[in-house]
Image (cartoon, coloured by chain):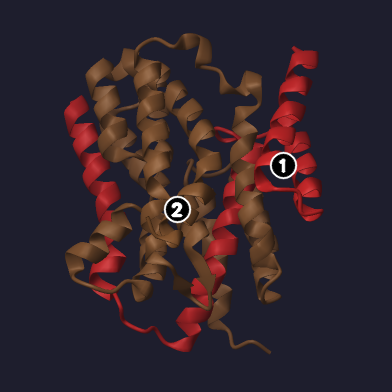
Chain colours: A brown, B red
Amino acid sequence: MSTARSAALRASAPLALPTAALGVTFGVLAAPIFGTVPALLMSAIVWSGAAQFGAVSVLGGGGSMPLAMGTGLLANARFLPMGFALAPSLNGSPLRRAGTGALMVDASFALAHRGEGRFDPVTVVWSAPLQYVGWVGGTAAGVAGATMLADPGRLGLDVLFPVFYLGLLLPELRGPSRRLVVAGLSALVALVLIPVVPEGVPVLAAAATALLGLKEPS
Amino acid sequence: MTWVLVGVLAAGTLALKTFGPIVAGGVQPPPALVRVIDLITPALLTALIVVSTFSDGRALVLDARAAGVAVGVVLLLVRVPMVVAMVAAAVVVAGIRLLVS
C-alpha cells in the first residue's frame, strides 16, 4: 500500500469512533420511523449524517415527506461548492472524477487540502473507507437495538467532531493571514444564523465567506 | 414513501458532490478563484466547529461541549497529538455531564 494511502487512512482514523457513535444514534432514531432495513440502507447509500439527521428530525417532528427531502438536501448543499473547489485537482475521465467527488466528506475534503487551491485526490479517496465503515456499522448496531449506546453525549463523544476539525483548522490558519480573517467571519456568520435559519444553512452561508478571496490581496 | 426519500437523498447528495468534478475537472481556474478555493477549507472547518459546539438543532446553546472544545484548543496549540486532545476533550465533557446530571 502506498504511503499516501496509508497516511490518509491513519489521518482519518480518529473520526471512525465518533462517526460510529453517531451512526448508532441515527439507527436508534430512524428504525421506528423508516423500518430496520430502509434505515440501514439509507446509511449505506446516502452516507451523510447531516442529510439523514435532517430528514429524520423533520419526520420525527411530524413534518411532511417533501419537507424532509428538502431539509436533507439543503443540509448537503455545501458539497456543491466543495465539489467545484476539488474539481481543478482532479484528472482522468469524468467517471473517475465523479467517483472521487462521491467519496468527498467534510473530513476527507479538509485532510486533502494542500493550499493554493490544490487538493490531493488520493487523500480524498482513502480518508473515506473508515468513515464509511464507522457510519454503516454504527447504524447497523443502532437499528439492531443497541440503545445503551444511543446517547454518545454521555461519553462526551459528540465533542470529538469539533476538536478533530480544530486539529485540521489550526495548521490552515498558520498559512496566509486572510484565512484567519475568513475563519473569524465564518464563525460570526454561523453563530448569528444558527437560531434563525434551517439546519445546514449556517454552514453553507458561513462557507460563502471564502468569496472574500475574489478581492485582490492588498 | 420511505424508499422515495432514500432515493432522493442518495441521488441528490451524489449529484451535489459530483457536479463540480464532472463539469470542471482538471481545468485550471483563474487566480481569483484559486484564492477563493484556498479559503473554502478554513471557512468550512470553522463553520463546522461552531455548529457542532454551539448548536442543538436550531437553538444556540452554551454547554459542556464548549468547555471540552476550549480544552482541545489549548492542547492543540501546544502541539499535543490530535487523538490526545480529542480524548481529553471527551473526558472533560463526560465529566461535566456526570456532575451536572
Residue occupying image coordinates x 39% and y 60%: A2
> Three-letter amino acid code at disc 1?
Ala
Residue occupying image coordinates x 51% and y 48%: A10
B60 with respect to B71 (left or right)? left
**A14 is higher (above) or lower (below) than A61:** below
Residue A177 on image: x %, y %: 71, 75
Visible in this render: residue A62?
no
Mark 2, residue position: A6
Q: Quadrant of residue B98?
A: top right
B54 with respect to A112 (left or right)? right
Residue A116 on image: x %, y %: 53, 78
Q: What is the chain letter for disc 2?
A: A
User: Closer to the camera, A98 or B54?
Assistant: A98
Visible in this render: residue A210?
yes
Element class at badge 1: helix
**A13 is higher (above) or lower (below) than A19:** below
Tell me the mark number nearer the camera, choosing from 2 and 1. Answer: 2
Number of other residues with Cα within 10 Å of mark 2, as a class: few under 14, some 14 to 19, many 20 or more: some
Residue occupying image coordinates x 59% and y 88%: A216
Quadrant in which the N terminus of chain A is drawn: bottom left
Element class at badge 2: helix
**A143 is higher (above) or lower (below) than A78:** above
> Three-letter amino acid code at disc 2?
Ser
Number of other residues with Cα within 10 Å of mark 1, as a class: few under 14, some 14 to 19, many 20 or more: many
Residue occupying image coordinates x 21% and y 26%: B2
Q: What is the chain letter for disc 1?
A: B
User: Closer to the camera, B79 or A166?
Assistant: B79
Figure label count: 2
Label pair 2/1, CB-CB below 8 angstroms: no
Residue A86 on image: x %, y %: 39, 67
Residue B68 on image: x %, y %: 74, 35
Mark 1, residue position: B85
